[in-house]
Image (cartoon, rainbow, N blue to C red):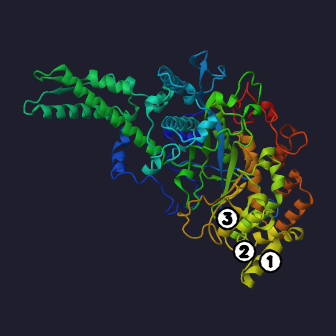
Amino acid sequence: MSSDDLRKYYPYPTEGVIYSEPPSAADLGGWANPQLEGDRVQHEEQEQGLQSYRDELQPQLGLRRAESIDRGSSERYPAVTGQTSSDLGQGTFGVELEFLAVQFAKVKNVAGQLAIVDPHPNESRWHSTKLSESELKYLRAIQLEGLDLSEYMPTNREIADRSITQKEWKRLRYSRTKLTRILRDRGLVVIKWPDGVINEIEEEMGYVPINDFSDSEASDDEREGDFPNSSRLGDFRSNYEYDQSLDTDGNYASALAKWENDYYDYHEVNRLGLYRTRDADIRDLANNRCTISGWPNLQEPEIQRLRAVLEERLRLERNAEKQYREDDRNEQVDPLHVPVPGLKQKYKAWTVTFDPSVDGNGMVKDRYSNTDNTESPFDEYFWFGAEVVSPVLPMKDERSREAIRVACGALRDSLRCHKPMEVSTGLHVHLGHTKGWTLFQAKRFATLWSLSENTLLRLHRKDRDADIKWCAKMREGSLLWRACHSTNLSERRTCAGIPQRYHPEAKRREFEAQMEANVPSNAVSDEFIFYLWQFDSINALNEGLGQNDFCKPGVRWRIRGVDSSLDGNIFAVGEPGTIEVRVMHGTLDADNINNWVIVLEHIVDVVRTFDDEKFKDLLAQHLADERPDRLLHLLGVPDDTREYWRDPKRRDEDDRYWEYPDKDLVDWADPFMVPGHKATHGSFWD
């Protein structure tokens, strides 16, 4: 599908539509802030002349730029009653989807014979037969050498605990490409961002090199070419006439130049992209369609060497065009992204990366049901620990919700994605704003969160409430809490400098007045709350409440500055300028994700727009009745969203936490999320 058709279908299709050339620039309908100087594509460090060379090749590559995209009107949620309208600008969010997808079935030793054994042979969704066959070939060679196979067939836990091998790096790069293609096929704008975990040289080069396509699945080789040139190359012929005025080397060079120029001219005249010509066609052209006449005494071995050089040159040029095309795709931006100050290129589109922490740790046999004689179900497959990251999306925009539905549906329709697991994966939501975060707003957010986090955690799985490694509570994991309340004297000494006890009198009174105006009297006496309001900069608040050597908190303060997160050089901070909420369990249930995002959007509204009296009253009412539904009502969350969280199908017997229908024991007979974007366990649970 050409970019000319985009206006008909974009921004996001509800059925599969393949965009071979996604839009390269966003038209945000005039409401977005203009791009800042530092907000530029970060692939400009490639060698000089690359862009001009690419421009020369644009006609034959067919890389047309999309016309401006008409965003149209968006359906916005009404403002919560009593909010002021002084906080202009656009609220933003982004999601990080963590999940495990099958790469391929492991090779097993069955009665002394090595074989590929797929535990779920009737499952039609993808796993890589190519990688399975490669692993089988590798292990058979080991077996023939008489070596101990057990050393070459590690468990997933052993793989996670050691350094990544070159073979595993290659598999990771292929898996990233596979997921990228799946999402692109559904119309999402997805870029490959340099990732040192997957390829250690990518960060040094500043761009992502194309894969070795010979290692791709046959179907993916087909897709990489989109529409191969094979059927339109049948008329190509090139003949070189021997030039008596040149010596042998001169004729060699002239023959190669004639064949290459004819090859390029034919592609240009027939509007064929060089990147769509396959290896088999290049081999055929070089050996059967490029001929020589009038060359005396030319021996066949010499002709074969000449054609081998031609074949290699044409293949290298084709790969270079693939690289230019991939670079072009990796400079594209999602039309829905919000251009907030300091935004890096990788947050303007969807990205796929490998997260080594998403390794299935804890998924032992006891975490499964119906395992039969399987000793270690999780070790029946090689898995890809995926993290799919959205661009910065506008809050309260139905198209943002639809983008998440499309992404979740695309992944689950195509891949064998492990059903939600205990602790092992999380759903992270980044909350931001085009005007940044002020110190006052950050204090409000921290206050509301610290007083309600026990209630908010009840919307999620019970293991998220108990997790101190990846999403510790603010009141248990932060350095400020440890300084105020830890029973461990060593911890308290370590954190003693976190509370800011010595401000000038005027500053101290200012902070106390703000606290008393915003915090109910029964919470003001809380030492933790008192010192929270004494922080004199966002940097100090970040240190006191953010990630530390003891744990990773459920809320990470990815902002820096003094009075505003936009203070100073926002391009050198290395943070996305967001408050990252990490308390939700990992899932590809778009309804679950979107309903959680709606809750967070209303928290942001309250923090940013309620006046002091209304904010204080909300906290007082919550502390008097800490039920989840009551809190959602106070936040102004819509009735249908509240009903979603109340539904007993999603709650445990005591109505304490979210619970899946399998009671958090994954059924090994059916361990993968069902296709679609809704409930991971099937339509009954929607």
**Residue 635 in picture, x, y percent from top left:** 82, 57
Q: Which mark is residue 513?
A: 1
**Residue 142 in picture, x, y percent from top left:** 49, 24
Q: Quadrant of residue 240?
A: top left
CA gap, disc 2 and disc 1:
16 Å
Q: Are marks 1 and 3 in contact (CB under 8 Å)?
A: no
Please identify, in this view, whether the residue under mark 1 or under mark 3 is nearer the observer: 3
Q: Quadrant of residue 505?
A: bottom right
What kind of residue is marked 3?
Answer: Asn
Please identify, in this view, whether the residue under mark 3 or under mark 2 is nearer the observer: 2
Q: Which mark is residue 13?
A: none
Residue 62 or residue 38, whichever sits in front: 38
**Residue 89 in picture, x, y percent from top left:** 65, 62
State the SS at label 3.
helix
Please identify, in this view, whether the residue under mark 2 or under mark 1 is nearer the observer: 2
Residue under label 3, please give it: 542
CA gap, disc 3 and disc 2:
13 Å
Q: Which mark is residue 500?
A: 2
Q: 10 Å neighbourhood of mark 2: few (<14), some, or many (≥20)?
A: some
CA gap, disc 1 and disc 3:
22 Å
Q: Earlier in the sequence, mark 1 or mark 3?
A: 1
Residue 98 or residue 375, whichever sits in front: 375
On the question of residue 205 being in view, the answer is: yes
Q: 10 Å neighbourhood of mark 3: few (<14), some, or many (≥20)?
A: many
- Residue at image position (81%, 47%) is 459
Question: Split into 4 quadrants, where in the image is the C terminus?
Answer: top right
